[in-house]
Amino acid sequence: MAGNSVKVAGVEVSTDHWIDGRRVASARRFADFSPVDGSHLADVSAADKEEVEQAVAAARRAFPAWAALGAQGRLPILRRFAEGIKARAGELAAVETMDNGSLLLGNVHRMVPRAALNIEFFAEWALNMGGHKIDSPEVVNHVHYDPSGVAALITPWNGPLMLTTWKVGPALAAGNTVVVKPPEWAPLTCSLLADIAHAAGLPPGVLNIVQGIGEEAGDALVNHPDIDRLSFTGSTDTAKLIGQAAARSITPLSAELGGKSPFIVCADADLDSAAQTVAMQYMNAGQVCLAGTRVMVESAIEEDFLGRVRGAMAHMALGDPRDKDTRIGPLITKEHFDRVAGFVDRARQAGAVPVWGGSRANFGELYFEPTLFRNVTPELEIAQREVFGPVLTWQSFTSDDEVVEMANNTRYGLAATLFSRNEARATSIASRVVAGTVWVNCFFIRDLAAPFGGSRDSGIGREGGNWSFDFFCDVKNISVRKGSFA
């Protein structure tokens, strides 16, 4: 491997950018540490405006030929890309675990297979986006999905590989070229992704990866005048800044942001299944935007259900994410640990009472105990703002109207989870909750053909199936007058 590289979990990883089919080093670098054990993993190239300019220019040069291949021509290349991800699944999983602290078992069995599926699924879905006809009395409307151009994709640290491919898959399948800005707290699997894409035969300039700090590389990318689409997953505050940049150039923006999702448990629910699912909200140390962090339980079953959740927590072992028995790993950085601890301290001061947890775990510097607060009133910060850590709140309700009001009492609207055996009741509650996704008697199941995104401060737009192509394409109507051709 040419240029600068390091060994992480026995895997050689380049620490340089990937621009126009080659590795490009920066004079400035930033340190990447593992949350698992605090070890120094790498010093990674830090892009500035110059490298961003190179990447965007390379993507622009590569766009005409990539777009001209059509969905059928791009399909074999993208299939090889997906197969390459599968072939290196063990390596990708091991590097991702060391880089962001996520569970190795989850990466092997869920995240890496999903990353491959993201590429494969959208490559095949694009075959159906060749346009269709709408017949009118005087004209025939021919609807076309044209590639939009160069897409800038900014991805988060809590699932960098999977969430990068969630954007790269439809963007490339639609015929666009891309510039990816990986998260500075966990950039390494995105670097491996470039090697896999290159080995699959992706032409130079079609996929470019520029590493760096958000305020520098990210800012240069979102403000670049030659970007045709901006797709971002991350915090609401950062999205507001990106939205301002997009508005200046009238660049379409898709943003999947934070959440403060309700988890509603009705008295008629399968309580054991619901309790086990509540315990699952601590997965990835609570660093999941979709997590149902506000548990809302019908008062008639409140104490019974709390006991069942306590029992389910017995299986949520905290420890080294490389251990197959671990279910809760570390927080990503000391900065983030301090943020989570600050939320917990202020909740205590405001009168909330921890049922369990509430402190640093007796395991390592970045490990925080799974925490549950009671005595939580709706206006408390802990019930309003996204913590992004292993912290849940507990509230009770006595009627469906009350729980819907509680569920909608934040600025977020990303997801909701609801357990009830009564179909009519579940349908009524789900239809009134403000959320992009409502899971009923299940959790974290996502069909790639279905729409995904958030309402309110949780996002702009939808992704998945046709919705991804609506964003990554210029949708054109060619309206032809009937009988006007000789």
Image (tube, grey):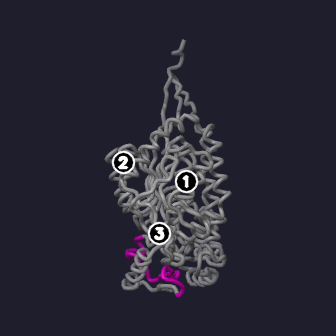
Question: Marks 2/1: CA distance?
Answer: 22 Å
Residue drawn 46% across the image and 58% down it = 233
Query: Mark 3 or 2, which is nearer the eye?
Result: 3
Question: Marks 3/2: CA distance?
Answer: 26 Å
Question: Marks 1/3: CA distance?
Answer: 19 Å
Quadrant showing the C terminus: top right
Looking at the rendered structure, the secondary structure element under dot 3 is strand
Residue that sits furthest to the top in the current view: 486
Labels 2 and 1: the sequence-earlier one: 1
Residue 428 in view = no
Q: Nearer the viewer, residue 478 or 199?
A: 199
Q: Residues within 10 Å of mark 1 (few under 14, many from 20)?
A: many
Q: Amino acid at mark 3?
A: Asp
Q: Is residue 319 above or below residue 239?
A: below
Q: Nearer the viewer, residue 68 or 386?
A: 68
The residue where tag 1 is placed is 194
Looking at the rendered structure, the secondary structure element under dot 1 is helix
Q: Amino acid at mark 2?
A: His
From the top left corner, tell me how far across and down residue 164 is, in percent: 53, 56
Q: Give the side of residue 63 with respect to residue 125, left or right.
A: left
The residue where tag 3 is placed is 32
Q: Amino acid at mark 1?
A: Ala
From the top left corner, tell me how far across and down residue 445 is, in percent: 61, 61
Residue that sits furthest to the front in the current view: 2
Q: Is residue 373 above or below residue 232?
A: below
Q: Which residues are magenta?
A: 362-385
Q: Give me the disc on residue 224.
A: 2
Labels 1 and 3: the sequence-earlier one: 3
From the top left corner, tell me how far across and down residue 441 is, in percent: 62, 66
